[in-house]
Image (cartoon, helix red, strand yellow):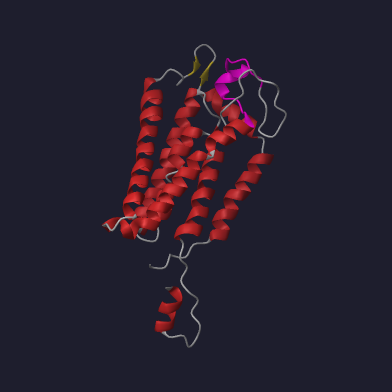
Amino acid sequence: MPHSRPFNFLLWSSLPLAAMALLLFLDTPRIDFALAHLFYDPQGGFIGRHSAFLEDVLHDRAKQVVILLGVLAVAGFLASLLPTRLRQWRRPLGYLVLALGLSTAIVTPLKAVTAVQCPWSLAEFGGVEPYSPLLGHHPYFDKPGRCWPGGHASAGFSLLALFFVLRDRRPRLARVALVGALTLGTVFSIGRMMQGAHFLSHNVWTLLFDWMICLACYRLVLYRPAPLVVPGTSERQLEVSSS
């Protein structure tokens, strides 16, 4: 198997972790509420709440496409276990199944644990529930929130896995996949913000979680660093050591 291209894991794991720490100390509610008010009409509610395009196309149909991609990845991985041409893609397909699965699977448990309310449920936006911060006191709710992190955003940002699948085999295509995943996740995020389903910070947390999951899985499953070259080591010895 060819060696992986160099990658600075320390840098690209430290930056997201630092961003997570920063989000915990920043006054994110002020930013969240200011942006949410841009999409909110006191007379009619959130401007995208009853949008057929946002709900049926950008939410339901788009999520189904991502689910289909996941199903194809599982099918491809199972096929790679057989003596077919997909055998050479067994490890990348296995990585894709793992990264996509974990990136989306963590959303529901985190929603249940945090019980964060959606903007449309808050009194300031026409609902009845009081606002409570992520790590602050949560008063009793008849219907606990299920809005942190952003579930739909994870459908887009989970595709960051495609970047890591391709970076050692097709670097240019990997960059396209990276931009595509970030763009899709952002579009999904804005769509749900327009509907009142999430604040900006909910979706930023989703991006950071998905990046860390895809990065960790890449390091464990796909990354194959080139061996250190010791003076006097022959090419044959290098081949044996890397095999």
139 relative position to 172: left or right: right
On the question of residue 201 being in view, the answer is: no
Q: Residue furthest top?
A: 43
Quarter containing the N terminus: bottom left
Q: Residue furthest front?
A: 82
The correct choice, above or below, for 5 with respect to 98 in the image is below
Q: Residue at x 40, y 83 (%)?
A: 236
Q: Residue furthest bottom?
A: 232
Q: Can you give x and y, in whole percent of width and height, for residue 151 in the image?
A: 50, 33
Q: Can you give x and y, in whole percent of width and height, for residue 161 in the image?
A: 43, 49
On the question of residue 162 being in view, the answer is: yes
Q: Residue at x 43, y 85 (%)?
A: 234
Between 97 and 149, the residue placed more toward the observer is: 97
Q: Can you give x and y, in whole percent of width and height, for residue 125 in the image?
A: 58, 18
Q: Residue at x 38, y 38 (%)?
A: 66
Between 243 and 188, the residue placed more toward the observer is: 243
55 relative position to 82: left or right: right
Q: Which region shows up in magenta?
A: 114-130
Classify residue 5 by image quadrant.
Answer: bottom left
The correct choice, above or below, for 207 with respect to 44 in the image is below
Residue 116 highlighted magenta (yes or no): yes
Between 108 and 21, the residue placed more toward the observer is: 108
Q: Residue at x 41, y 39 (%)?
A: 184
The correct choice, above or below, for 62 with respect to 93 in the image is above
Residue 208 highlighted magenta (yes or no): no
Q: Residue furthest right?
A: 137
Q: Can you give x and y, in whole percent of width and height, for residue 79 in the image?
A: 31, 51
Between 117 and 72, the residue placed more toward the observer is: 72
